[in-house]
Amino acid sequence: MATILRDLSYRYQWLYDSISRVTALAVGGESRFRQFALEGLDIRPETTVLDLCCGSGQTTELLVGRSLQVTGLDASPLSIRRAQQNVPDATFVEGWAEAMPFADKQFDVVHTSAALHEMKPVQLRQILQEVYRVLRPGGVFTFSDFHQPTNPLFMPGIALFFWLFETETAWQMIATDMTALLTDVGFQAIVQTLHAGGSLQTVQCRRPT
């Protein structure tokens, strides 16, 4: 069940952006947070990139600075309209992450940020399978999202945040072994990096060649 604050944050962009900025302070600010999943990636002008669950295009804007072939996908018509206004140099498509309207092996890189925790376990697996499908052999999937804190001092903060702004799917996410799940789907070369006392994870992996 969604909280009132969660509903309001999606209705009013200024509130969503404020929440994002405050939350990102734990890892050095929003700009730093948006860069986590992109670190070390070789993204060139010809690289085909999908920004999955792109929202209003905060990270899409960073991606178009590196690639001329960036596509954003989101299921929310409102988010797509905002993204088109914010990042006119990208292509935006309305659609579901678990049933993407793209051809097989279409993208070199698929990125998503703070979105997978909103999915139920069955949806999460479907989305990872779809990511695998639309990636070219050797392509990279990279994401940042919540993780079970390894430092207990961070647990009260993340618990409060989940209570105010998230649903049970966020708790399910941090109880999920993402490395094992990605391996089961077929990804290889999985690298997981933890931040902020383990409360945030960045994962990069590849579809085998």
Image (tube, grey):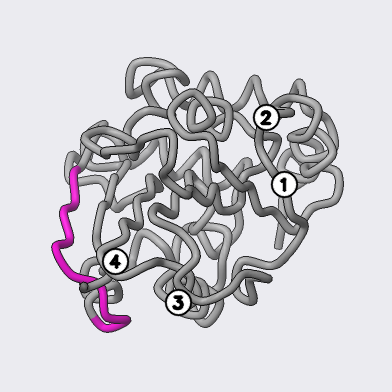
Query: Disc 2 marks which residue?
Result: 89
Quadrant including the C terminus: bottom left
The residue labelled by disc 4 is 178
Which residue does the numbered mark 1 point to in the structure image? Answer: 92
Q: Nearer the viewer, mark 2 or mark 1?
A: 2
Between 18 and 5, the residue placed more toward the observer is 18
Q: Residue at x 16, y 54 (%)?
A: 191
Mark 3 nearby-residue class (10 Å; few <14, some 14–19, many ≥20): some
Mark identifier at residue 195: none
Residue 72 is a magenta residue: no
Q: Position of residue 100 (x, y in %)?
A: 63, 70
* Image quarter in which the N terminus is found: bottom right
Q: Earlier in the sequence, mark 2 or mark 3?
A: 2
Q: Name the amino acid, label 1.
A: Phe
Q: Which residues are magenta?
A: 184-193
The correct choice, above or below, for 9 with respect to 52 in the image is above
- Point out the frontmost of discs 2 and 4: 2
Q: Which mark is residue 133?
A: 3
Q: Position of residue 182 (x, y in %)?
A: 29, 72
Give the number of the mark in front: 1 or 4.
Answer: 1
Assess whether mark 1 and mark 2 are in contact (beta carbons under 8 angstroms): no
